[in-house]
Image (tube, grey):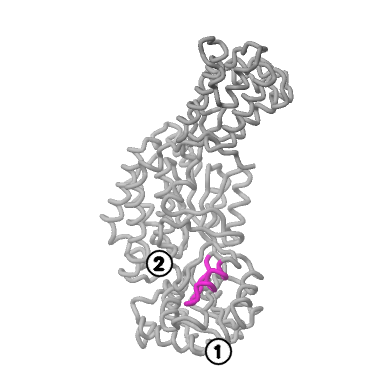
């Protein structure tokens, strides 16, 4: 294990993963792998989770192909340095933000969607220029095996390595130093991952879970709502981290919801659900028994049939569920749907907020104001109104949790950002030292005044012409004093009149930084020579520039 990680780290240090052309080549190779070995991938998913070919393709393969297309199209733009806003002191310098790879990334995949939840973050890590250690879940044994076989055939073997094993191997793996860790799984293991990462100050992205609530309002199309809830809840036999975990509704809706979900289940899976090719199985016997334990003492309105030999648990609906019941204390992660009665939306909001922040929140209502109020009144990793799970499919939205449901996010550009360091870059010149003298000792109040002007004003490049015009006007005013043939009385601008009417010769304004700058209270402006009316006029003009449309004051 250590030798594998060392090889990957040395490969990253060589710089081979950094060129955009190389990243695109690796992503193209990954797409070829998915397309050329699709049959092997689908067979592995069928063996692990009893997924039909169509279910496996639609739930896992399509997502990966779509993500690859998106990244391949946009990566050249994403890697481009982005210019940063500047202030007066840096307006002639170059300031930008450059995304750069973090280093060696560890991705620990999940067993419930073992292909997509392992490969999708891998795409982002490669796109960002990292080297990657991939740790598939040992519970989805066949998928882990096919990934171990295929990835080295298509990707650079020195930069991307697969390490397999169970708890013991994963524990040893977490003792190694990585530059970022992305883990998908339970909250309990997420804490272990975070604790191990903290020893090396390694940043983590934790995609965990939680009990994702689903509120059904009296003002909604109940047929559509129940069809969509049924699809999201019982897909993959309920083993989906963002499946609706339980329903909140007014008591009058409970029996209607049960009836409509029963009808929808028959529509989806037929009279004999156990024989349906579209209904999956629980991953292993441990989780099978865990789910059965949650059913003890509950009122089963529908379903409840089980078969330990095939790890089959029928789609099950529970009614009149006590909020303190065991089934309401942990994420179900199975085909069991509790219904909890609440008086109204306000009580639903209080109920949700009294518990840990969920990974997802679903609301079904025609009332847009109510939807907005429930979104504003709660917190969750993501939210979807009048549907379930679909926010996961939109690559333009970040996917991640909050609080106990996780930290960080990925998908699309967000994956690239997660696995990148946004490096701040400022390229200055060794010239123009006069203005920089303001920051050198000895310090004075006047220097602080000028520093505030230069540093707290943001430079608006779009109005550079106006700034230059104002400066030229100031120069003309100074020259007017020295040119006897100019009619000083014709100078109407207050700034120019103050200078022209002053008896004292104007000093060399361009060297003001070398002297001792003063505020509007007079005194030396920098260099000796401007009289007080001149100083006040020039300062007033420059302050006007700072307050006007040419510059905007930085937020504090």
For mark 1, give the secondary structure.
helix
Q: Residue at x 64, y 79 (%)?
A: 323
Q: Is residue 20 magenta?
A: no
Question: Where does the image place residue 382, in percent across and percent down from the top left?
Answer: 51, 63
The residue at the far left in this view is 36
Crowdedness near tag 2: few (<14), some (14–19) or many (≥20) residues, C-alpha within 10 Å: many
Please identify the quadrant where the C terminus is shown.
top right
Q: Residue at x 56, y 38 (%)?
A: 552
| Left or right: 321 in relation to 84 | right
| Mark linked to residue 460 | none
Q: Choose between 536 and 73: the one closer to the eye.
A: 536
Q: Up-down: is 300 above or below 514?
A: below
Q: Up-down: is 12 above or below 379?
A: above
State which mark lies toward you, 1 or 2.
1
Q: Give how far apart the Cα atoms at labels 1 and 2 are.
A: 41 Å
For label 1, the residue is 252
Q: If you read the primary sequence from the N terminus, does the residue marked by circle 1 or circle 2 appear first?
A: 2
For mark 2, give the secondary structure.
helix
Q: Is residue 365 magenta?
A: yes
* Residue 231 visible in image: yes
Quarter residue 381 falls in: bottom right
Question: Where does the image place residue 290, in percent across and percent down from the top left?
Answer: 56, 74
Question: Where does the image place residue 314, in percent across and percent down from the top left?
Answer: 45, 82
Question: Where does the image place residue 79, in percent across and percent down from the top left?
Answer: 40, 40
Q: Choose between 117 and 549: the one closer to the eye.
A: 549
Q: Are marks 1 and 2 in contact (CB under 8 Å)?
A: no
* Residue 153 visible in image: no
Where does the magenta region start and end? 360-375
Q: Choose between 378 and 62: the one closer to the eye.
A: 378
For label 2, the residue is 48
């Amino acid at each position: 294990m250590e030798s594998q990680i060392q090889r990957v780290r040395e490969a990253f240090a060589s710089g081979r993963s950094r060129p955009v052309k190389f990243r695109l080549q690796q992503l193209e190779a990954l797409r070829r792998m998915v397309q050329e070995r699709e049959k092997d991938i689908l067979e592995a998913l069928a063996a692990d989770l009893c997924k039909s070919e169509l279910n496996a393709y639609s739930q896992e393969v399509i997502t990966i192909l779509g993500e690859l297309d998106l990244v391949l199209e946009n990566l050249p733009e994403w890697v481009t340095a982005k210019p940063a806003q500047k202030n007066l002191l840096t307006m002639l310098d170059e300031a930008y933000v450059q995304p750069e790879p973090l280093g060696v990334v560890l991705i620990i995949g999940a067993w419930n969607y073992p292909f997509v939840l392992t490969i999708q973050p891998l795409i982002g890590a490669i796109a960002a220029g990292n080297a990657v250690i991939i740790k598939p879940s040992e519970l989805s044994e066949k998928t882990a095996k096919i990934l171990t076989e295929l990835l080295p055939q298509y990707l650079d073997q020195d930069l991307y390595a697969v390490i397999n094993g169970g708890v013991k191997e994963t524990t040893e793996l977490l003792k190694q130093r990585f530059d970022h860790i992305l883990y998908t799984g339970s909250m309990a293991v997420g804490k272990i991952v975070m604790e191990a990462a903290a020893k090396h100050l390694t940043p983590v992205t934790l995609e965990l879970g939680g009990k994702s609530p689903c509120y059904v309002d009296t003002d909604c199309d109940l047929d559509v709502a129940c069809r969509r809830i049924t699809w999201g809840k019982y897909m993959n036999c309920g083993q989906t981290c963002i499946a609706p975990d339980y329903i909140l509704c007014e008591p009058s809706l409970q029996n209607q919801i049960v009836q409509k979900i029963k009808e929808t289940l028959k529509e989806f899976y037929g009279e004999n659900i156990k024989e349906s090719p579209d209904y999956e199985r629980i991953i292993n016997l441990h989780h099978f028994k865990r789910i059965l334990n949650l059913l003890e003492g509950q009122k089963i309105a529908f379903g409840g049939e089980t078969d330990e030999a095939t790890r089959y648990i029928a789609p099950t609906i529970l009614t009149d569920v006590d909020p303190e019941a065991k089934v309401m204390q942990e994420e179900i992660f199975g085909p069991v749907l509790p219904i909890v009665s609440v008086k109204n939306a306000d009580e639903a909001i209080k109920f949700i907020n009294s518990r840990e922040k969920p990974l997802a929140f679903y609301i079904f209502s025609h009332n847009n104001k109510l939807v907005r109020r429930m979104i504003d009144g709660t917190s969750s990793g993501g939210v979807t109104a009048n549907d379930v799970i679909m926010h996961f499919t939109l690559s333009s939205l970040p996917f991640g949790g909050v609080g106990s449901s996780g930290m960080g996010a990925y998908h699309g550009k967000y994956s690239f950002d997660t696995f990148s360091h946004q490096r701040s870059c400022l390229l200055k010149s060794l010239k123009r030292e006069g203005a920089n003298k303001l920051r050198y000792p000895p310090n004075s109040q006047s220097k602080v005044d000028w520093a505030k002007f230069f540093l707290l004003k943001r430079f608006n490049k779009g109005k550079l012409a106006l700034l230059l015009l104002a400066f030229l006007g100031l120069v003309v005013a100074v020259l007017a004093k020295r040119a006897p043939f100019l009619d000083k009385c014709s100078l109407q601008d207050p700034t120019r009149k103050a200078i022209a009417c002053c008896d004292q010769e104007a000093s060399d304004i361009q060297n003001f930084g070398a002297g001792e700058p003063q505020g509007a209270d007079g005194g030396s402006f920098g260099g000796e020579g401007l009289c007080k009316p001149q100083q006040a006029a020039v300062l007033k003009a420059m302050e006007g520039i700072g307050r006007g449309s040419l510059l905007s004051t930085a937020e504090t």
